[in-house]
Amino acid sequence: MKIIRVDMAAKKITTEEIVPAFTGMGGRGLTSFFINKEVPAGCDPLGPENKLIFAPGYLSGSSLVNSSRFSIGAKSPLTGGIKESNVGGTVASDLARIGISAIIVEGAPEKKHSYLLKIDKEGKAVLLSADGLWGKRTYDLVKCLKDTHGENHSITCIGPAGEFQLSAASIQSTDMDGRPCRAAGRGGLGAVMGSKGLKALIVEKTKGKTALIQDPESFKAGAKIFAKAVMENEFSAEILPSLGSAVLVEPINAAGAFPTRNARQGQFEGADKISGETMAQIIKSRGGKPNHKGCSQCIINCSNEYVDKEGKYMTSSLEYETIWSMGGMIGNDDLDAIARLDFLCDDIGLDTMSTGVAIAVAMDAGYKEFGDAKAAIEMVEEVAKGTEFGKIIGHGPARVGQHFNHSRVPVVKGQSIAAYDPRAIQGMAVTYSTSPMGGDHTAGWVVDSNLEAFGGTLDQFSADGQVENSRNVQLHMAAVDTVGICDFAQTGFGAPDGLENVCKMIQAKSGNPFSTEDWNATGKKIIQTELEFNRNAGFTKEQDRLPKMFYTEPLPPHNKVVVISDEEMDTTFNF
Amino acid sequence: MKIIRVDMAAKKITTEEIVPAFTGMGGRGLTSFFINKEVPAGCDPLGPENKLIFAPGYLSGSSLVNSSRFSIGAKSPLTGGIKESNVGGTVASDLARIGISAIIVEGAPEKKHSYLLKIDKEGKAVLLSADGLWGKRTYDLVKCLKDTHGENHSITCIGPAGEFQLSAASIQSTDMDGRPCRAAGRGGLGAVMGSKGLKALIVEKTKGKTALIQDPESFKAGAKIFAKAVMENEFSAEILPSLGSAVLVEPINAAGAFPTRNARQGQFEGADKISGETMAQIIKSRGGKPNHKGCSQCIINCSNEYVDKEGKYMTSSLEYETIWSMGGMIGNDDLDAIARLDFLCDDIGLDTMSTGVAIAVAMDAGYKEFGDAKAAIEMVEEVAKGTEFGKIIGHGPARVGQHFNHSRVPVVKGQSIAAYDPRAIQGMAVTYSTSPMGGDHTAGWVVDSNLEAFGGTLDQFSADGQVENSRNVQLHMAAVDTVGICDFAQTGFGAPDGLENVCKMIQAKSGNPFSTEDWNATGKKIIQTELEFNRNAGFTKEQDRLPKMFYTEPLPPHNKVVVISDEEMDTTFNF
């Protein structure tokens, strides 16, 4: 396994073998360890000292199902702390198959030039000029790149938002159909890529090859058990394929935890117009694809292709978090408008969540009316145009709040929360507050354990057990993000001795012993590494706080506030 | 001595006697103690929990010369920490003469209404509607107020920038000629006044009355000694009256310490076009007033009235810091344009320093060319218009830097440095870094002790002795800002046993013993109070740092960087 190191100042590419300390590591484990080791914590996130690190999951490129998560890490211009954002699509498995564990992009070129990093199927990397491609939106960019380099490539790229180095800029990656619709959205990593003058990473696809496994027979046996569990679970085998992640709209809204109109309400009266059920019906009636395979090795097919009334492609894939941020959060119940906003964000290279919340904050501050989808679309278009107001929106909700002197800004460490109001799901208050990633849902999704409808045993309105539960889930997720298994395929851990089974696959890949204790130690080590970086960057426990609105404004209809005390919050990672 | 407390939510005014703990206190001492005592450190600076406190100096309203500084304090929306900004003019002596030690404005009204706080010469305070005056620039406002209430008032007010709650908004106060040209510029306190819905404070002038003095004979004797020293010192008796503070342009530029073009150079090739000497000649040749009495009790008359080619009033008073921020800092050598920018800032209610540096950062980021005075004027006009870009400029340089992803932003704790580059006057590096006020020059002006031309004995490029010297000056200034003596009249301390003489006047006023030890203890207590508030607001030593540019970019022509280590810096206030 090797690492490709790209010096953007000298335009020099070197290859190194992965050092022994990182054996058994991939994805978030690798990105976070390298950032903490090599990036000065106090550096300017958009300066030459920051590094942008790409790393497929440790199990990516293997025969294991749903193992194609691609981690991207850097010091975040949005949070000022360490960041890992992962994305599906095809690039993780393509890189892993040719034996590449990580790509470290460092330094910065002179401002007037931009580049493509092209890696062929032998693993050879070159920097090519992208001067003629700078300024392009992602769908057009991908078309041009395929025209020049051929269809047979995975492309990971930025749009205008990343070029402008905006703090809500995403990195987009191509799906199974070659569309740049998969986003590493959070943390403004697209801005870091823009600061490196790197427009795109193009990886040639290989056929037939798989990542090197030391004990292929054991691995195959484990992968089979895992796949069987995924396919025997109702959620991953039936619900997700038919409704996608949008299935969550109805139960989260019913629980009063669907942040509406910049989190002024916990229920959206238009929820049934934008629910998973409604979306599936609309797509079906228009001849689109209610389910669709988005990522390499996927057997769930939670993705979809949303089409307009004429059956023409509008976007893929319309997901729960976007339906919230561009729907309920801005008071918009028009699913076609949400689809348009989703497409625009992918095309411009913007995080749909940060952008939707930025629009919500602007509306809450009185800039436009809630529910004005046309105004929302115009605001997103302004980002692409690079107007001064577009920059404000593109820098995310915290900047919008500052601009309008508006204090109702639902962010932690500068990053917006997700589609679960912490007042109605107290466990999410812990994850949002304490994750080294800032306000983030994937870092520790504890919605299931908080809601009875999901089989949860914790009280959604009580502090009891929330810190311990979020801690455990966050540690586990750090390890999951390291092996590169899709969050939705976590049902595979539900096999008999499911965690042991995953550990056996890790052992089979590396040839070294790997126990469930090692799994737990890995998660803990990653979180510790990330917390260390953040401390060195100047973070204190004062940053592990939700904004005041969540403590002082009771959320209708349950009229609860966050009840977890600062003291309890601070025990989350007191190791 | 009494305190007027104004509850803007209930529209209720109460009067209380000053509590014994504050005996002997005025100005910054009072504002900082009340803020630390009554304002939650974690509060939103623009929310109802913040308080805006006005306090004349302890010796204001007496027969002492140059004793008319008016302290205004609050939690700052610019720095996030405690703030005291003081201003001259006439209001401090008018309030002190009617026995008012402080006005505490708390709470916030419903958004749609605004108010005037009017205090008559008996000390009676009322809130009047200012709904018809909201939106007015300060010169027009003052005219309207005098038309309604009569000439015989001191007016302290905000312009559109304060109404928009922008972080660079000033509070303007009327001078001896009743013009709102005296600014409490720093820290965005105009935004706090705007958040309270308070458009203006109007204080009726009294004649013949002076502030209560327990031992008038002793006081008179001390005041005479002080005045004599001021009048026998060349700087306060000759240089300041003839050239004003603009006298500094030439020597600071000669020392290579005049931050030019967003601090890319330490010397400005156009310096002689904007020097004090040139300004005095221009004013004289056009029939303006090269010297002028701006403040009650002033015997220095460092102020001026700058006029255009037709002899028409342009602004008063054109000061060194503005000539720098709107001149060298933005590469502009047109003194008429500087005068226009100064007037606009006073009229719109903007800090000339933060605004000039904000423009400099925008120019440095490539938004406009350095030296484009027309563009600078347009940017300031945009602030008054309330455009989205105007808001960015009006929020100050840090926000402009964030907006353009430009890291060359010369601020500490969010507030811009002043007209002394810390690379060429290392002592100012200590003051900028460690003052609880953020990047600030008046908190500890150590230029004289750093430059041989001023009789200084410290090496301007060396760390030796700088921490100790800045510490001593900062402690002393905290006490000076408490008694309300003008910084330029500090030559009065140069009388034989000058500090003892000032202490005797304090004693004569209060009737209680006050020694030079008490003076030192007062300065220390104030700084400790301010540091405590900042710590509670989440500040750590990480905030006591200059931006990286000062450590990594050698400043021409001397090509030095800041050489004071973080460890040394952290010993400044280790008590």
Image (cartoon, coloured by chain):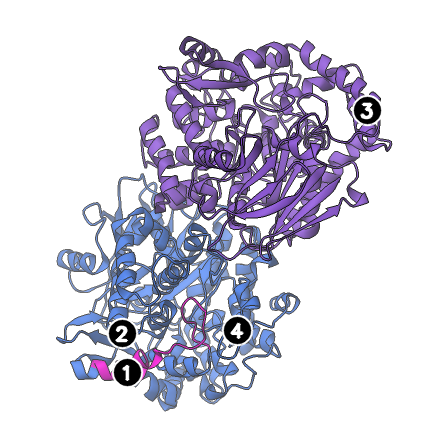
Chain colours: A purple, B blue
> Which residue appears at 57% of the width and 19% of the height?
A293
Q: Position of residue A441 (x, y in %)?
A: 58, 29
Could you say whether the residue bearing mark 3 is in a helix, strand or loop? Answer: helix
Are the two marked residues, 1 and 3, in contact with CB atoms closer than 8 angstroms? no
Mark 2, secondary structure of its residue: helix
Foreground disc of the pair 4, 3: 3
Q: To which chain does the residue with label 2 belong?
A: B
Whichever of labels 1 and 2 marks the residue nearer the N terminus, that label is 1
Q: Which residue is mark 4?
A: B423
Could you tell me the amino acid type at mark 1?
A: Thr
C-alpha gap between disc 3 and disc 2: 79 Å
Task: Measuring from the top left, give residue A300's x and y in whole percent.
Answer: 62, 16
Name the kind of residue labelled 3 in the image: Pro
Provide residue B554's location: percent of width, then percent of height: 54, 72
Q: Are marks 1 and 2 in contact (CB under 8 Å)?
A: yes
Mark 3 near mark 2, Cβ–Cβ under 8 Å? Answer: no
